[in-house]
Image: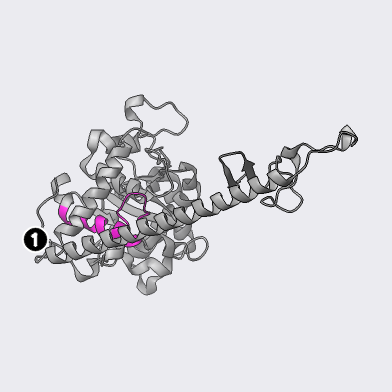
Amino acid sequence: MIPAVDSTQSPPGWHPRDRVEVTSEDRARLQRGCYLNDSIVDFFIKFMEFVLLPEFLPETTPVFFFSSFFFGRLRCSTPIDYAGVQRWTNHAEDLFSKQFVFIPICDSHHWSLIIVTNLNKLSRLFRAWLESKRGTESMDPSEVPTVVYLDSLSPQRGNDFLPVVVSYLAEEWLFRKERLSNPGNHVAESRLALVREFFKKVIRQIKPKPPQQKNEYDCGLYLLRSILNFLRNTDGFRQRCVAFRGRNPIPKDAQLAHAYREGDILELREYIRQVIDNLTEPEVVKQIEKDEAERDDRVASYRERDMKEIDEEIMAAVQADSLRDSLSFPPSESQPAASRQDPSEMNHPGCDDGEAGGAVGAARVFRGPHRLFKAKA
């Protein structure tokens, strides 16, 4: 059920920088078979942050959401462009006070997600690590600072993305905790190396396998569904994320692969559309739906016209082929058998140059009394 939202009132904690503009073209991407763009992804993340989050987590649970543009900006240079994103957390009070941090990723037209947990435990761990250089082996997995990569197509992509986030966290710590507290923002090289070593050794990086999409366009919905399930901890989703233990066997009830189904993805499409409509003036929604219906009618008429033209071309080709066959003569009996050619092996005008009609090539022509069409091999 969609919570009732008063579109004339800003939710608590909302700031003008949190505004996300959604157009009718963006809304149309919520139709089945369409790829979600950054406007829809960022809009629904903001909706979860300001409307749904209070229903799922206690108010005392510190959470932070990055926008979908953050990760791409971070990777503008090698290994990372920290200067380019340094101000992105100015309004976050302290990123290292957060229990959960969400980073949506759009790379090569594919959406995936990184969740960082337990950053609020790093200060205590850092002090203990400086004293003993011991890691987190004895800690409960649910308490260990962890970077989790969730990808509905290929978890192995995380091999490139996880180290980027860990490097960012190290630089963020150095800037907020070290440089700003020292005169002239100066930090000794030995201290820089120490902090970076701490982050690499202490923060766990894992790639559990979430539910996998069966098409090429639902990745954005899988990202949003994973955030939604994580926030409300559906069927222990949160614990199942951090229960991943590398190559060690994982109990079936701890695996993520069946945490949600394809039907849940279809339901989420409709849910987001209804959220947008609930925040839109009724007259505007009616006009959008009218425009979409007219567009669908135009598309249907174009398809009908195209199919009619294709049918006419096929019939003309069939008639021309039948006429040519009726005018051809069989080889004479005196012609050597070796020189006779099987009709199915003869070159056909519809084939590529020099390609035999019965051969497999870039385009094939299937001949018969009731069918003649081209198809890609």
- Residue 194 seen by the camera: no
Looking at the picture, the colour scheme in use is one colour
Mark 1 closeness class: few <14, some 14–19, many ≥20 residues within 10 Å = few
Q: Nearer the viewer, residue 59 or 262?
A: 262
Residue with the mark numbered 1 = 6
Look at 17% across and 66% down and name the residue there.
284
Is residue 321 in the magenta section? no
The answer to which of 2 and 180 lies nearer the viewer is: 2
* In the image: residue 278, left or right of residue 101: left
Q: Where does the image place residue 160, in percent across and percent down from the top left?
A: 50, 50
Mark 1 residue element: loop
Q: Which residues are magenta?
A: 28-51
Q: Is residue 39 magenta?
A: yes
What residue is shown at x 45% (from left), y 64% (from top)?
A: 188
Residue at 20% across, 70% down: 16
Dominant SS in magenta: helix
Q: Give coordinates of residue 215: x percent, y percent.
A: 42, 44
Decide if residue 38 is in sight here. yes
Q: Residue at x 22, y 60 (%)?
A: 289
Q: Quadrant of the C terminus?
A: top right
